[in-house]
Image (spheres, grey):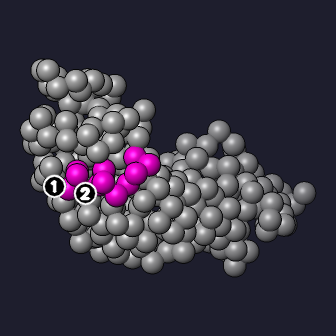
Amino acid sequence: MDPEKQRQNDGDGGGGAAEADIERLPVDLLAHILSLLSSFRDLSITCCHVDRIPSALLFCRAVVRAGGVSRRWRWAVERSLASRRRLSFAGQRTGNDTAARLIRAAVNLRDLDISRSCWGCHITDEGLIKISSADCVANLTSISLWGLAGITDKGVVHLVSRAYSLQHLNIGGTFITDESLYAVANSCTNLKSIILWSCRHVTEAGLVALVNKCRRLECINVGGMRVPPESFVGLLSISPALQIRSIPRILNAGVQVSTPGVFGWG
């Protein structure tokens, strides 16, 4: 090998040669490799920061570092997203436009998690409205909007009104009102579980509408709400098998107390 090329390869740890080899891989194979990554970050511009991707595959690190260098990589990213069934933005500094672009590309998506965690997703009503136009929304079975302080009924209503297949919804820690529950009740008739933990602006009227129309509803988490405990007796009269979790004990009401933790479905 030419000494100058040898020094260049030694200087970048062989990364240049690895990227050259990767460039010769078929697009389908590149898409499969990208699908193995556990965290997507700004793939809408096909450029990720390698040090922030928790992947154990060194080969995948080289793939990501080479992102954006050609149209082939964009195709690979698009195919990878199109094959995904689950997409999580939890803990990522994701904004409205980035999230909407990725979700629109994930045409086979079934499970969407844009909940806020340590860093948080900076999603607002504008983002939810953009996301609601994605083709996959009608087929989503699970959505988590946990702790998104920047959303209101306006964005939530747009999203859930198109989520006809929704079975699990986590909307705890938000500032929604009964208006969002009315939209869920009218559009998400297959709903099986919903987390409303600390939704302090939701009233008994919203809960009654939800239980009345979502006849497949099995579990509802109401911890931290301002609804009087006695109100839940009326919900059980509508749906006796309904599991009402994280409520205070109601004396002489026959309501079984269950407090398994507010972050899971079970």
| Quadrant of the rendered image containing residue 136 | bottom right
Image quadrant occupied by the N terminus:
bottom right
Tell me, yes or no, if residue 43 can be seen here. no
Of residues 177 and 63, the one nearer the viewer is 177
Question: Which residue is painted at 30% across and 66% down in the image?
Answer: 183
Side of 108 where 30 appears, left or right: right
Q: Amino acid at mark 2?
A: Ala
State yes or no: residue 176 in magenta: no
* Prevailing SS of the magenta stretch: helix
Q: Which residue is mark 1?
A: 205
State yes or no: residue 207 in magenta: yes
Does residue 65 lie above or below 218 as drawn? below
Q: Which residue is mark 2?
A: 209
Of residues 227 and 148, the one nearer the viewer is 227
Of residues 212 and 134, the one nearer the viewer is 212
Question: Which residue is painted at 14% across and 40% down in the image?
Answer: 231
Label 1 close to label 2 by CB (< 8 Å): yes
Region rendered in magenta: 206-217
Q: Secondary structure at mark 2?
A: helix
Residue 126 x %, y %: 30, 74
Circle 1 crowding by C-alpha within 10 Å: few under 14, some 14–19, many from 20: few
Of residues 18 and 136, the one nearer the viewer is 136
Image quadrant occupied by the C terminus:
top left
Does residue 117 lie above or below 143 as drawn? above
Q: Amino acid at mark 1?
A: Ala
Side of 159 where 172 appears, left or right: left
Side of 92 where 30 appears, left or right: right
Question: Which residue is painted at 29% across and 32% down in the image?
Answer: 245
Does residue 196 lie above or below 224 as drawn? below
